[in-house]
Every structure is written in C-alpha cells, then in structure tokens.
Amino acid sequence: MKLGILLPKSTTHPLIGYDFLASLKLSMDTSGINNYEVVTGNIGFGIDEDLIYQETERLCIEEGVDLLIAYADRPKIDGIFPLLKALNKLLIVVNSGGKYPESWQREENVIYLTLNELLNCRLTGKLAANEGILKGAMATSFYDGGYSLCHAIVEGFVDGKGQVEYNYISKLNADLDTSSMIDFLKSQTDQFAVLSVFSGDLASEFIQQIGYSQLDTVSIYASPMFLLDSMRKMEPSLLKVKGYLSWCPTLDLPLNKSFMEIFKESTKREASVFAALGWDAGLICKELAGSQSTHDYKATEMISYLKEQKIRGTRGNLELDLDTQHYLAPSYLLTIKNGEPVLLVDPIADAFIWKEMVVATEELPLTGWFNTYLCS
C-alpha cells in the first residue's frame, strides 16, 4: 500500500501534522502492516485550492499512491473531488469536524474521519438545557466564532427550550477581557449556562477570569477543544466545567492506553487528540491493506468493504454512517471540578443526534473562515 497524505500547518497547534503522521505510522506498524509506504505533501492552512490540487496531482499521478488522506476541510477540498473520482482513488478527509459542509450529500469515493466537534457541541448544548438551566450566555473568540461550533452548541441549547440572553466575542489580537460579561452575570439571579467555544491559550485564560469571579449561579458548558486545551492548566475553583468530546487522555479504554504509551515511548511527548485521530486513520488503512484482494484499491469497492466493518479505535467503535459517509464514534461527558477531570465512562448513543443535526443544517446558509479549524 502506498499512502498519500496532505498535511496542514498551524501556529496555534503546531504539532497537528507531526502528531497525526507519527501516530498513523505507529498504528500501522503496531498492527503488523509493514508493506506500506507514505508520501506527504504540505497544504498550509488548507485555504490555497491551487496548492491542494497541485499536491494531489503530484501524489496521485507522479507518486502513484493507492489512496489519499487529506487533513483539510470543505469547501476548499472540494476541488480535488472530480480528479480523484476520475482516477477511482479513495479520499479520506480528516479534521476536527468544526464546520458544516455546504451539502451533506455523499461523494461515492470520499469518506470522513473527524473528531466530531459539531456533534459534541450540539450534545453539550442539549445537556445544559436538560439539566434545567434555560438561560444562557454565548462566549467565544473572534477566531473560534468563525466556525460552525457556536451554532451547534446554541442549537442544542435552544432545542431543549433554552434561550441565549447574552453574547460575548473576544477581540482579535487583544488581551482577553471578560469584565463586561462578568458584570452581566453578576447582575443576574437565575442560573446561567455559559456556552463556551474557545481553543488554545484563550480557553484556560477564559476559565481563569470567570472562575475567579465567584459566580455561584454560573456553569460552563464547553466545546471539546476548550476542554482539552484548558484541562491541564486549570486551577482548582468552585466553577464546574463540562461538555462532550470524543477523546481525552483520561479515556479508560485498553486500546487508548496502549496507543498513548506507544506514542509517548516513540516520540517522547504526550499523546494529543491529533495523534488519536492519526492512530484511528492508521487502523482504517490497516483494514484496507489487509483486504486488498477484495477491492484492489478501487475507491467504491473500498468504501463498500468499510461499510461492513466495525473498527475499534482509540475512542471506541468507529462506524461509517451510510448516508453521509462520516465515521461516528462514541461521545463522552467530561466534567472538570476543583481542577480535576472526571470522565463519564458510559458513552452515549449519538447516531440519532447526528442525523438530527444533518437534517437541520442541510440548507443552512454558511459563512465563516475557510481554513481548516485549528489550522491558522
């Protein structure tokens, strides 16, 4: 098997491409697949369509790869769909899952492996309302707010009869200042759910500012990257932070523990969520490498084969949704209280919520940033 991989770059999360690639290779090696080759191309922040197409041509035509993995997102990746379809090459699109596509209609040679951030945000919004907190404040950064995550978490909240009464967006390239939001929350007597979508250092900075304000009526319901980027830096406070995610380092699954140990031993650094994504991508490739006689690396036949497989990944079973050809994985509830993360070990069945989200956003007008989420 010869794999072509289009890798991103990021200034906020500089190890995305490195962790993903290293973990994919370790996953393949650990699975006993040794007759494979990897060829890579760099596509920057995933916004240069000409560069994406040029690297795709190089990998498919000059290098002759059997399938292509692209760490990118729609709509910028759409330009290579016709070429790969004509070549009958399988495309596996991987990313965080932070943007709605213009259409959920499946392409016959494309599958998606993401961190299901949109789904988890929708679940988190529903959680806030289901816990009886029906007044909310939306908080995000200028950057994170340019993706579909805010819509997903608010829609989940509103579906549960919640109502957003305040919006906060941090300024671009300026120190985080939540004083206006804190003043508003202090003036309220009802319980408030602060629906929070942040990533990077802003996540931990936000929680520190809100946490030190002694807001007894406030609970934080957070996006997955908020939880992951803040959980190791969070100081003990009375504030409770919770939300759904697909993976975290405390996930007590044998395969996850094994993956983290192997990754750390090989790279000398802690495993990240991007490494977990790479490991799971390697498991999909392992399935395809071991079944070459059934598909001979023809895209449509490979997808037909994968639809019949249940792949046990770092976050639990991965199953291909037949309507959208997106892989779905279990979602887990993470609660952080007094600075300590506690993961609910029983995953929820989220296929129904996924279909609900797909139907609700099928014809949604889209605006926002074009670069792949976290690749900026």
Image (cartoon, rainbow, N blue to C red):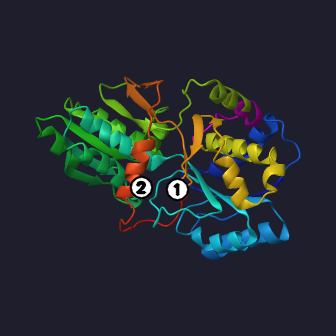
Question: What residue is rendered at 59% in x and 60% in y?
Answer: 72
**Disc on res. 90:** none
Q: Which residue is mark 1?
A: 324
Earlier in the chain: of badge 1 and badge 2, it is 1
Measured in 3D between alpha carbons, the distance from the residue under mark 1 to the one under mark 2, in whole angstroms, is 9 Å
With respect to residue 105, does 340 lie above or below?
A: above
Q: Is residue 179 visible?
A: no
Q: Out of 127 and 309, give the one closest to the viewer.
A: 309
Q: Which residue is mark 2?
A: 358
User: Residue 359 lies in what quarter of the image?
Assistant: bottom left
Q: In the rendered view, does 72 fall on the left or right side of 100?
A: right
Q: Locate residue 57, reporting x and y percent.
A: 75, 72
Q: Is residue 286 visible?
A: yes
Q: Amino acid at mark 1?
A: Thr
Q: Are marks 1 and 2 in contact (CB under 8 Å)?
A: yes
Q: Is residue 31 magenta?
A: no
Q: In the rendered view, does 243 fall on the left or right side of 313?
A: left
Q: Locate residue 226, reporting x and y percent.
A: 43, 42
The magenta span reads: 263-273
User: Residue 375 lies in what quarter of the image?
Assistant: bottom right
Q: Out of 195 and 282, give the one closest to the viewer.
A: 282
Farthest-out residue, bottom: 50
Q: Locate residue 20, reporting x and y percent.
A: 67, 47
Question: What residue is rendered at 70% in x and 49% in y?
Answer: 305
Q: In the rendered view, does 97 fall on the left or right side of 137?
A: right
Question: What residue is rendered at 73% in x and 67% in y?
Answer: 88
Q: Is residue 268 magenta?
A: yes
Q: In the rendered view, does 4 fall on the left or right side of 124?
A: right
Q: Out of 63 and 293, give the one closest to the viewer.
A: 293
Q: Amino acid at mark 2?
A: Val
Q: Secondary structure at mark 2?
A: helix
For disc 2, the neighbor class at 10 Å (few under 14, some 14 to 19, many from 20) is some
